[in-house]
Image (tube, grey):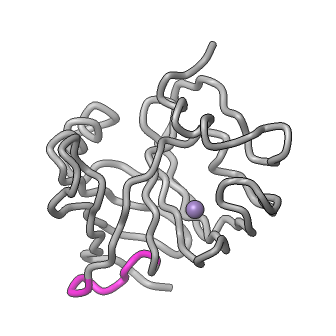
Amino acid sequence: MPLEALAAYRKKRDFATTLEPRGVSRRGSRGLVFVVQKHRASHLHYDLRLEVEGVLKSWALPKGPSLNPKEKHLAVRVEDHPYEYRNFEGTIAAGNYGAGDVIVWDSGTYEPAHGDGESAVLKALRKGALSVRLRGKKLNGEFALSGSSVHANGFSSRRMTNSRANAT
Ligand SMILES: [Mn+2]
């Protein structure tokens, strides 16, 4: 069954020539997962992904996540990725979208800082300001995705800050 949420993701990729997962539907039963992947594409960046309703809501972080609450880093919303992408590591072959090396830089579980579960995450995303508690190996603490969006449909350009986070 095709996942409408992944249409933009699939449109950009030729699964005959990239190792990346095509994606299948999935319902979360345990903790919501997050992952930050380090992506050596034409420009080195990090990708933050949060599990919501069976897919990974995704942001590109050109400078990675900020561990300093006073320092905001740009986070640009990109297309939803399939749940299986949380484990993806490898080289996206030349000529493909995002060609370059991907590694999992950090992963773990997360929860919304306000409210409970996926419905609270979706509500916060609609409002354009989401605070989450990340429980990873490197990222452990509360992070905020907030700021003014540059597109009418919202949440395209975000600043990511970290409050009360522990850098390790
Ligand atoms: Mn990327």
Query: Residue 77 in the image: x percent, y percent?
Result: 38, 54
Give the dominant element type of the magenta stretch: helix, strand or loop: loop
Write the start and end of the magenta stretch as one range: 64-71
Q: Position of residue 50 (x, y in %)?
A: 45, 49
Q: Which residue appears farthest toward the front when viewing the image?
A: 95
Ligand 1, image quadrant it occupies: bottom right
Residue 49 in the figure: left or right of residue 37: left
Residue at 80% across, 62% down: 94
* Percent of width and height locating residue 83: 60, 38
Q: Residue at x 33, y 73 (%)?
A: 74
Q: Is residue 26 magenta?
A: no
Q: Residue at x 55, y 58 (%)?
A: 35
14 or 136: which is nearer to us? 14
In this orientation, which residue lies closer to the viewer: 67 or 2?
2
The quadrant where residue 98 appears: bottom right
The vertical placement of 63 against 58, above or below, is: below
Q: Is residue 19 left or right of residue 98?
A: right
Residue found 32% across the figure and 78% down from its top: 73
The image quadrant where one finds the N terminus is: top right
